[in-house]
Amino acid sequence: MSFYNNRMVQILSVILYPITAFVILSNGAKIVSWVIPAVIAVLFCFLWKNLRNLMISNALLWILSVPIWLFWIEEERGAVVFIANLPIIITLYMFIVFLPEVIIVLIRNFLLNKLFRHRNNE
């Protein structure tokens, strides 16, 4: 349990997720598979201590990524299309990425608490 109580590990996981996710999502055409991003997202779910860290990481991802992506889109029409599709992208992200992350972190925390509570009672 000391791994989850290590403040430096938690800060690194909160900061590293947006960077990793941004790099992977920006190179999606080269990766051509959703397996790698899914595995990385699940691995980060096991690194975060609680929902607060998960939410901070995801907020940082969106706060940093959207302006950078808009800056990278060179043609004006591409930026307009991106902005027009942003509500759909965010909605899909909430149900396909964020909600499963929340569920995984909650289940992991429940199991860890139950396991350590059981060990302490022995």
Image (cartoon, grey):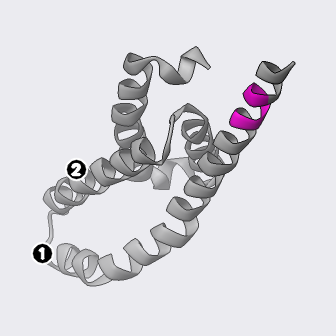
Up/down of 13 relative to 85, above or below: above
The count of marks equals 2
Residue at 42 percent of width and 27 percent of height = 10
The residue that disc 1 covers is: 76
Amino acid identity at mark 2:
Leu
Q: Quadrant of the N terminus?
A: top right
Residue at 50 percent of width and 60 percent of height = 98
Q: Label 1 vs label 2: CA separation?
A: 20 Å
Q: Secondary structure at mark 1?
A: helix
- Residue 100 placement: quadrant: bottom right
User: Mark 1 or 2, which is nearer the eye?
Assistant: 2
Residue at 87 percent of width and 18 percent of height = 122
Q: Is residue 33 magenta?
A: no
Q: Secondary structure at mark 2?
A: helix
Q: Is residue 114 magenta?
A: yes
- The magenta stretch is 113-117
Which disc number belongs to residue 64?
Answer: 2
The residue closer to the viewer here, 1 or 117, is 117
